[in-house]
Image (cartoon, rainbow, N blue to C red):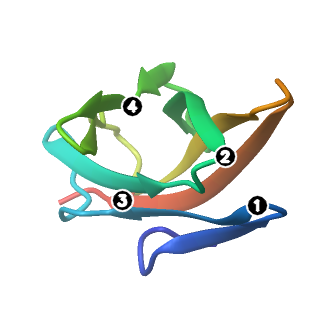
Amino acid sequence: CDLSVRQCSFLHKDGEISVKFLSKIETEEELLLSIALPDSLQLEEAWIEGVNMYMGKTPIIPENDVFVTFLGSCNLEKMQWRLSFKVENKNGQVENYSATFFTRRN
């Protein structure tokens, strides 16, 4: 699923998980996201990392019903990113999900 063009949805036995950007995807700007989970799941951790140029793990932080993150600048013309997150169910089982997206240098 490419978050650059649409919301990404994942099927889980307890319902649908979805993630989408609420603001235009730009480097060096605050980015807002929505991560929707079934009530039976809890978000344990979420982060973004570069795929074609590793620049470390950038955390995704909950803030007032949305999630906030920030992308660093990159010298590549087209940068591919991976948003990853872990969810835990009521039985303590953890599952991983990820989606990709792209930025272009201006």
Percent across and percent down for residue 98 are 67, 50
Q: Amino acid at mark 2?
A: Ser
- Occupied quadrant, residue 63: top left
Question: Which residue is identified by label 2?
Answer: 40
User: Closer to the camera: disc 4 or disc 2?
Assistant: 2
Q: Secondary structure at mark 3?
A: strand
Q: Disc 2 and disc 1: Cα gap in Å? A: 7 Å
Q: Disc 4 and disc 2: Cα gap in Å? A: 21 Å
Do callouts 2 and 1 mark residues in contact (Cβ within 8 Å)?
A: yes
22 sits to left or right of 30: right
Label 4: how many Cα within 10 Å (few below 14, some 14–19, many 20+): many
Residue 60's tag is 4
User: Closer to the camera: disc 3 or disc 2?
Assistant: 2
Percent across and percent down for residue 53 are 55, 35
- Mark 3 or mark 2, earlier in chain: 2
Question: Which residue is identified by label 1?
Answer: 14
Q: Secondary structure at mark 2?
A: loop
**Quadrant position of the N terminus in the picture:** bottom right
Do callouts 4 and 1 mark residues in contact (Cβ within 8 Å)?
A: no
Label 3: how many Cα within 10 Å (few below 14, some 14–19, many 20+): some
User: Closer to the camera: disc 4 or disc 1?
Assistant: 1
